[in-house]
Amino acid sequence: MHRMIINRSSLFTGGSNGTLASLTKFMFVTESNQSSLNNNYGALINCESRRFGRRYRKWHHWPNDFLPFEWERPVQDPPYLRTGDSVRDIGMWDGKSLIPGAEYSKELANAPETVRRLFTLEFATRNVIVEYQKRKILNQVRRHPHDNVSPEVKIADYTVRIRNNLHHFIKIDKYDAPRKIRQEILKNRRNVLLKDLFYQDRERYEYITRLLGITHEVPKLGVKYVKPNRKSELQRLTKEYCDKIKEERLAQYHEELKAKQITLEGDIEKIEKLIKDDKYLGTSN
């Protein structure tokens, strides 16, 4: 199949008749001259290069292998996985347990085992299992049986939802963008509640973080987090290396002086004795 290529620059040359004249400057690309055209175009730009894509951008910098120490950029998990939770799932559950709400059914209590098994967690969906685990955890942190608004209950609720999202990212789909947005919202809301609980009731804060396995650091006043970069880290490592060399050489010089101190004390005694003898004999000037 033939393709037509038109010289765009010629469309704006040639006066009023330039456009009509330029339309005649075309060529048909066949299989014979396709290879030469590709070679000439490839010399200008590499179509397969990922240089201009943000997703495939890498860190390119000068090598630092000439330095007496090594530094590599720290590898971190994506933000949607850095939640501070010790586990990344909603926990273990018993498959023989009834789904939420089925324990109040009187007919199900007298039903056959095959019918009763259909209402257990073994055949339940993921949403039902998450609801079951959330109820079980909320019962451990409630201040009273009807507590649904305390900070501990809200923190536990957010924790179950966050860990369910972690399970989704790790096992199912790590490119789920809407869920990542919801994950950030849940993380921020839980951090606000944990910070308020830290300043209001330190005992409950320590209890809820220990029970749920949450690693949370309260932001310190006046301390600004600075993201580590290559230049500042190399400067810091260079300063530490130079300070270490200076301390080692000072310690070595101190040991040399201590070794010379014994002979110096003997020389001082001889000099003092000579001074006394000169004064006694009257030969000193």
Image (cartoon, rainbow, N blue to C red):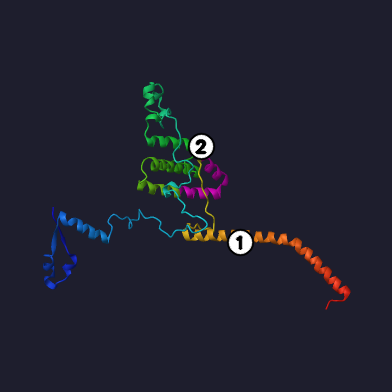
Above or below residue 267? Residue 105 is: above
Magenta stretch secondary structure, dominant: helix
**Residue at mark 1:** 246
- Residue 284 lies in magenta, yes or no? no
> Which is nearer the eye, 175 or 123?
175
Q: Position of residue 264 (x, y in %)?
A: 76, 64
**Residue at mark 2:** 140
At label 2, which amino acid type do we have?
Gln
Which residue lies at the image location 54% right of the left edge and 45% below the top edge?
205
Q: Quadrant of the C terminus?
A: bottom right
Classify 10 Å Cα crowding around label 2: few (below 14), some (14-19), many (20 and above).
few
Above or below residue 128? Residue 262 is: below
Q: Secondary structure at mark 2?
A: helix
Q: Position of residue 33 (x, y in %)?
A: 17, 57
Residue 186 numbered tag: none
Residue at the extreme bottom: 285
**In the image, which residues are magenta?**
189-211
